[in-house]
Amino acid sequence: MSVDSLISKHGKRIVVKSRTVSSDAVGSPVETWTTVVGIYTAMVQISGGGDARVAGREGRQRTATLYLSSDQDAKIDIEARIDYGGASWEIRSVRVPDEREGTDQLCYTIVDVEEVLQ
């Protein structure tokens, strides 16, 4: 199966948000992730994770790889965050293969993400 057929068959909805920085009462920066850049369909492959316990506090860490087809013209960069599956994901890398120019069917975007614990 091609990546495009996997995206169309197993694709899930992701929401890409951009960061807005404001200041609190004492002048410290406060980040919010509310501005929606786009809503896309991506094949999500959870690639790892663990439930670590540090200093008596339980934490969860998951990583995933997202595959987006080129015809979506996704505006994704490492300054954005992704909402998927009830969690927020920080973008670690964005790769756009350059085997072909333009929005060829063989070209797709690969995004590596890590879950943000809130």
Image (cartoon, helix red, strand yellow):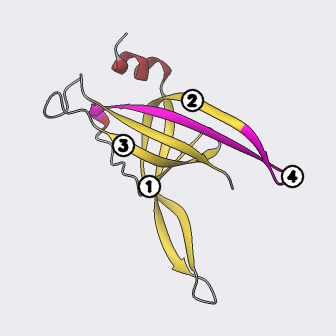
Left or right of 26: which side holds 19?
Answer: left
Q: Classify residue 116 as left or right of residue 73.
A: right
Q: Amino acid at mark 3?
A: Val
Q: Residue at x 15, y 28 (%)?
A: 100
Circle 1 Cα neighbour tier, 10 Å, few/some/many (<14 / 14–19 / ≥20): some
Which of labels 3 and 1 is toward the front?
A: 3
Q: Residue 46 — which label?
A: 2
Pointer 2 or 1: first along the chain: 2
Q: Relative to 77, is 101 above or below?
A: above
Main SS, magenta residues: strand
Quadrant in which residue 49 is drawn: top right
Frontmost of labels 2 and 1 is 2
Residue 115's spot in the image, x, y percent? Answer: 60, 45
Residue extending furthest front? 55
* Three-letter residue code for mark 2: Ile
Q: Magenta stretch?
A: 51-71
Instruction: Work out whether mark 4 precedes mark 3 in sequence or the reverse, and give the earlier one.
Output: 4
Disc ID at residue 94: 3
* Residue in the picture at 47% in, 26% down: 11
